[in-house]
């Protein structure tokens, strides 16, 4: 093993946090404890192994039990279903700290909680809640979310997957694409067209005609499982239909939950890139001194800190509004759009500061940069969220859409 250079030793230092405006002083004691617990776990358990998983294109399934034991799955749902009953600011902090490790970890927890557990809790029957939620909270059941299709991304209303009535249930036919957790999932919350509108179904692994082939060749989110879902005349019993919602309001409300977590997670990704770039700049010797003394390097670091600080304030206020019940989905769109764009630029700037070393996977910037290219697009592209906010402030829709409410 080659000896570590001075700046590489600095790279190994544990993350202690970035909080220029003392936003964390606004947190409750419980929220700070959650921050410290997840932060320490990411330092100790995720960062030492995530590069190897990224190289191999594998998800660290060995960490699922630990994630569940910390109470991070569906963390805002009631304790009687095995969840933690946390507030939304605390849940945002969880997402921020997980994505500081890698988008794959935040995506896994986000899908399990916001896209699988939330619709079962909100739109399912009590029998469905008792049957699935405790297993999902404990990590013994893994879930995925089937909405996006090969030809229906930003326009989910044009989905082709259909569910037709059958004796005792429904026959499901169609294909979903870009599904996180798909190939390792035990259940899938799937949205399909019926004669009475779009409805949700809980499809279980092993149902005849249901398959989830792994998607390969990704250059982004390599440590995350991404799959197709294929339904070939799959029989889904009536007791697996979510009865509490009809139409696009159901799937879009779930996405709104996940987008909230994405906004927080993107801030965590940006924090990781800034932390590494700052330490690198202080330790990298060039022209007989650290490159941190150069004006252009300082300009880049200050820009990153400025944007991260604004992002931290934005998501904290977002969490407050969500906890108070005042949050609107357009506000979530603004946060997702802003924070992911900011984080993507922070990752690129960090890589720039690190020079040629920045393209090595020993450093985090390039990995976060590649991940954020997906986050920039999924669960509502940057442009779509911009148009959602544009319609809200002008009263004119620039694209055909159906209201969430």
Image: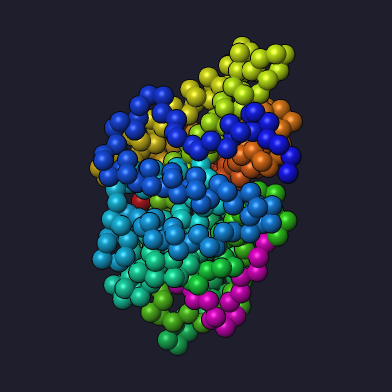
Compared across the picture, whether 355 is left or right of 400 comes to right
Compared across the picture, whether 142 is left or right of 159 comes to left
Query: Does the rendering let one see residue 367?
Result: yes
Tally the numbered discs: 0
Q: Residue at x 57, y 59 (%)?
A: 60
Q: Quadrant of residue 227?
A: bottom right
Q: Residue at x 59, y 52 (%)?
A: 49
Between 3 and 152, the one nearer to me in the picture = 3
Residue 346 location in percent, x, y?
58, 30
Quarter of the figure that contains the N terminus: top right
Query: Does the rendering let one see residue 251?
Result: no
Between 210 and 265, the one nearer to me in the picture = 265
Residue 79 location in percent, x, y?
27, 62
Q: Residue at x 30, y 66 (%)?
A: 81
Above or below, 231 relative to 310 = below
Residue 282 location in percent, x, y?
59, 22
Between 131 and 159, the one nearer to me in the picture = 131
Residue 301 location in percent, x, y?
56, 22
Above or below, 99 relative to 150 = above
Between 130 and 193, the one nearer to me in the picture = 130
Is 203 one of the magenta-colored residues? yes
Q: Residue at x 38, y 24 (%)?
A: 21
User: What colouring method underlies this structural image?
Assistant: rainbow
Extent of the magenta region: 196-215
Is 201 one of the magenta-colored residues? yes
Compared across the picture, whether 45 is left or right of 350 comes to left
Above or below, 189 relative to 314 = below
């Amino acid at each position: 093993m080659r000896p570590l250079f001075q700046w590489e030793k600095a790279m190994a230092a544990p993350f202690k946090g970035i909080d220029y405006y003392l936003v964390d002083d606004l947190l409750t004691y419980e929220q700070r404890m959650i921050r410290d617990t997840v932060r320490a776990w990411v330092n100790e358990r995720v960062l030492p192994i995530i590069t190897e998983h990224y190289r191999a294109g594998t998800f660290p399934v060995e960490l699922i039990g630990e994630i569940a034991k910390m109470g991070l799955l569906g963390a805002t749902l009631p304790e009687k279903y095995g969840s933690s009953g946390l507030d939304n600011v605390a849940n945002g902090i969880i997402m921020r700290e997980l994505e500081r490790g890698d988008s794959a970890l935040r995506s896994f927890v986000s899908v399990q909680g916001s896209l699988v557990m939330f619709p079962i809790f909100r739109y399912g029957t009590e029998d469905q809640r008792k049957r699935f939620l405790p297993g999902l909270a404990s990590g013994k059941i893994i879930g995925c979310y089937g909405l996006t299709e090969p030809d229906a991304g930003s326009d989910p209303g044009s989905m082709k997957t259909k569910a037709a009535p059958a004796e005792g249930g429904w026959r499901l036919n169609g294909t979903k694409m870009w599904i996180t957790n798909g190939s390792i999932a035990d259940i899938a919350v799937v949205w399909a067209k019926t004669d009475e509108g779009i409805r949700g179904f809980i499809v279980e692994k092993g149902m005849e005609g249901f398959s989830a082939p792994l998607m390969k060749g990704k250059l982004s989110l390599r440590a995350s499982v991404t799959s197709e879902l294929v339904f070939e005349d799959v029989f889904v019993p009536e007791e697996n239909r979510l009865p509490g919602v009809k139409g696009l309001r159901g799937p879009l409300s779930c996405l709104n939950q996940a987008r909230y977590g994405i906004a927080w997670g993107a801030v965590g990704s940006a924090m990781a890139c800034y932390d590494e770039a700052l330490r690198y700049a202080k330790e990298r010797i060039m022209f007989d001194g650290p490159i941190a003394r150069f004006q252009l390097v300082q300009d880049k670091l200050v820009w990153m800190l400025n944007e991260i600080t604004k992002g931290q304030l934005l998501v904290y206020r977002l969490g407050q509004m969500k906890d108070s019940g005042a949050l609107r989905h357009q506000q979530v769109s603004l946060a997702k759009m802003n924070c992911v764009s900011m984080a993507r630029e922070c990752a690129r700037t960090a890589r720039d500061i690190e020079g040629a070393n920045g393209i090595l996977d020993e450093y985090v910037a390039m990995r976060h940069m590649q991940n954020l290219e997906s986050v920039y697009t999924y669960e509502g592209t940057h442009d779509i969220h911009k148009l959602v906010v544009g319609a809200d402030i002008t009263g004119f829709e620039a694209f055909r859409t159906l209201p969430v409410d």
